[in-house]
Image (tube, rainbow, N blue to C red):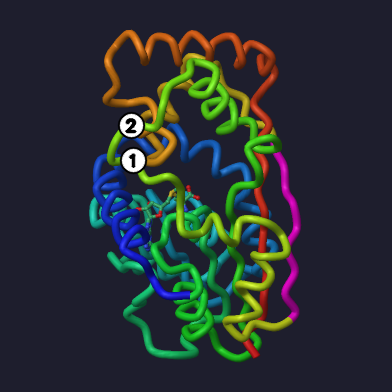
């Protein structure tokens, strides 16, 4: 499917958003995504000596765990400030600013590639998956995660419900959704990997609990997401207050932690 003007607009919106997140992501939203990182490393069979490419590495949490397993790590992110934060945290890795698709690597260079919560941010998911397949050696493994439905992934779903409960319309200039929305279910996601020529494809559901105080989580999401935060930030204060009040009521049921839920897709380069 061709990249549309809306997809390009989404990509530009994302770039502007992530450029403002590198200082606040790590200890906030990044502490939540980290709940899945060991499972992603296991799915990619990351161990000593494995040549791993991580895309959309953010501040480098997953790459740090891969290094601790003895992997040889190349970590990339589209945002140079994120890549800078990752480089500072990962003296043992090669860190580069690189956008997906368009990876600056020759073919067949890596034994494994992981993208943790990045495929939902790219303008052209089929081209991105094809690019990832290209840089894997035959037999190399690709592992991608994305968010499950808002009903399952309550850590974010509670924000969408709060916006709806407050009756707040989508602010002008905020994209309706990601181009990845077309692939955000198990069947479609598996199809995306197969269409890129990957074999032995499987998509599984994963869930964990993010234990965090509700007030803190409100701020973490505002400071560590792009599209979700854009539904709230920049509104008149009384509208933000209405959404915040609805969030407070809805979040009260998650005192023991917010359920987080993802899809994990695995495929092998033929
Ligand atoms: C939700 S964060 C995930 C970070 C990290 N992987 C994690 O698990 O916490 C998304 C990251 O993808 C990066 N990103 C967004 N669009 C990208 C693209 N087209 N190519 C590569 N990275 C991108 C952002 O800069 C951001 O660091």
Crowding near pointer 2: few (<14 within 10 Å), some, many (20+)?
A: some
Q: Write the residue at 65% across / 48% down.
A: 262
73 or 121: nearer the viewer: 121
| Marker disc for residue 171 | 2
Give percent across and percent down for residue 175.
37, 46
Secondary structure mostly seen in the magenta stretch: strand
Give percent across and percent down for residue 202.
75, 69
Is 216 situated above or below 148? above
| Marker disc for residue 111 | none
97 or 226: nearer the viewer: 226
The answer to whether residue 12 is left or right of residue 219 is left
| Marker disc for residue 174 | 1
Q: Write the residue at 53% across / 72% down.
A: 113
Label pair 1/2, CB-CB below 8 angstroms: yes
Is 60 situated above or below 51? above
Q: Is residue 153 one of those drawn in magenta?
A: no
Is 160 situated above or below 100? above
Give percent across and percent down for residue 120.
49, 55
Q: Write the residue at 61% across / 67% down.
A: 143
For numbered disc 1, what is the local secondary structure?
loop
The answer to whether residue 215 is left or right of residue 18 is right
What are the residue bounds of the magenta stretch? 200-208
Q: Residue 195: which quarter of the image?
A: bottom right
173 or 221: nearer the viewer: 173
Q: Is mark 1 within 8 Å of ligand 1?
A: no
Mark 1–mark 2 Cα distance, whole angstroms, equals: 6 Å
Q: Quadrant where the C terminus lies?
A: bottom right
Q: Quadrant of ligand 1?
A: bottom left
For numbered disc 2, what is the local secondary structure?
loop
């Amino acid at each position: 499917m061709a990249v549309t003007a809306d997809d390009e607009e989404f990509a530009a919106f994302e770039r502007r958003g992530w450029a403002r997140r590198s200082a606040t992501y790590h200890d906030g939203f990044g502490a939540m995504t980290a709940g899945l990182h060991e499972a992603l490393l296991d799915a990619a069979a990351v161990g000593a000596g494995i040549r791993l490419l991580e895309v959309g590495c953010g501040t480098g949490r997953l790459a740090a765990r891969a290094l601790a397993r003895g992997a040889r790590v190349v970590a990339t992110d589209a945002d140079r400030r994120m890549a800078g934060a990752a480089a500072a945290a990962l003296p043992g890795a090669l860190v580069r600013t690189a956008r997906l698709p368009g990876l600056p690597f020759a073919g067949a260079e890596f034994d494994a590639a992981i993208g943790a919560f990045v495929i939902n941010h790219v303008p052209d998911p089929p081209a991105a998956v094809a690019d990832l397949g290209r840089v894997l050696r035959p037999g190399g493994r690709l592992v991608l995660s994305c968010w499950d439905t808002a009903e399952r992934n309550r850590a974010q779903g509670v924000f969408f419900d709060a916006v709806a409960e407050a009756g707040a319309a989508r602010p002008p200039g905020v994209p309706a959704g990601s181009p990845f929305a077309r692939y955000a279910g198990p069947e479609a996601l598996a199809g995306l990997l197969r269409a890129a020529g990957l074999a032995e494809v499987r998509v599984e559901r994963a869930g964990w609990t993010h234990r965090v105080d509700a007030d803190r989580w409100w701020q973490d999401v505002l400071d560590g997401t792009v599209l979700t935060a854009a539904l709230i930030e920049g509104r008149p204060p009384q509208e933000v207050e209405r959404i915040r009040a609805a969030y407070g009521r809805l979040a009260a049921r998650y005192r023991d932690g917010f359920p987080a839920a993802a899809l994990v897709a695995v495929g092998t380069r033929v």
